[in-house]
Amino acid sequence: EVQLVESGGGLVQPGGSLRLSCAASGFTFSDHYMHWVRQAPGKGLVWVSRIDTVGSSTTYADSVKGRFTISRDNAKNTLYLQMTSLRAEDTAVYYCRRGRDYWGQGTLVTVSS
Amino acid sequence: DIQMTQSPSSLSASVGDRVTITCRASQSISNYLNWYQQKPGKAPKLLIYSASTLQSGVPSRFSGSGSGTEFTLIISSLQPEDFATYYCQQSHSTPITFGQGTRLEIK
């Protein structure tokens, strides 16, 4: 069974940093592109970032470019999102997604003083 | 960036109704179009990929069509578990973009 479990969310002050993790199991992690998608409270889905199978190619939404870094450790079957210079508008549930199909349950990031 | 526009934004319907949701892309995306269903407090679920291919395990009452800039999701006979929010998403080019969502409510 494919499982994606996010962790690392929480309350952080504006300007702070946070690292999200997504632990994958039930499939060959290194075979799949991975994504982060976020959803602000009561709002729609917004794509954040994508990484290729080996971690050599990454793409970001303009809203997070230069502040967020996506990475992966295929030996640990884990996807990461390093978030810096956080803003109130980054408050959202962050989902990891395998390719186009499976999603994790999400982890809530709240940026507030 | 490719903009995805769904219509309607919300819809009231009854069990057994046939429902159509439309998604329009601001430029041609061929068939690089996915449909997702999201229920409150839950992660989205893939329903349709490549515009018209039903994801494994998804009931056959869901169908998708279209190519280029116009796409349609049809639910042929609404079931109680189908009341949710539906999103289209293009994967033709980055940044990947979603429609704003269509909230399907019980009449």
Image (spheres, coloured by chain):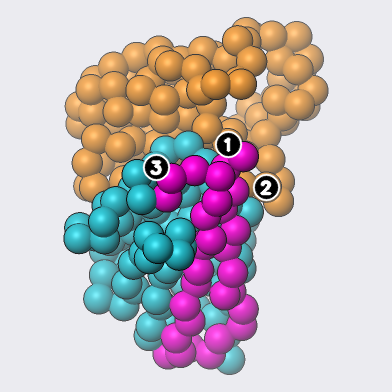
Chain colours: A cyan, B orange
Give the residue type that dot 2 points to: Lys
Please state the horizontal and vertical placement of residue A43, each as a whole percent of the image: 56, 54
Chain holding disc 3: A
Q: Nearer the viewer, mark 3 or mark 1?
A: 3
Give the residue type that dot 1 points to: Lys
Q: Nearer the viewer, residue A51 or A108?
A: A51
Q: Quadrant of residue A108?
A: bottom right
Please state the horizontal and vertical placement of residue A50, each as a whole percent of the image: 32, 55
Q: Are marks 3 and 2 on the same chain?
A: no
Q: Are marks 3 and 1 on the same chain?
A: no
The answer to whether the residue labelled 1 contacts the one labelled 2, judged by CB atoms less than 8 Å apart, is: yes
Say few, some or many: other residues with alpha carbon within 10 Å of mark 1 (under 14 / 14 to 19 / 20 or more).
some
- Highlighted range, magenta: A1-29
Chain holding disc 1: B
**B5 over B13 or under it: above or below:** below
Q: Give me the C-alpha separation between circle 3 and circle 2.
A: 18 Å
Which residue has dot 1 on it? B45
Chain holding disc 2: B
The quadrant of the rendering that contains the C terminus of chain A is bottom right
Is B23 placed left or right of B18 in the picture?
A: left
Q: Nearer the viewer, residue A88 or B94?
A: B94
SS of the residue under disc 2: loop
Which residue has dot 2 on it? B42
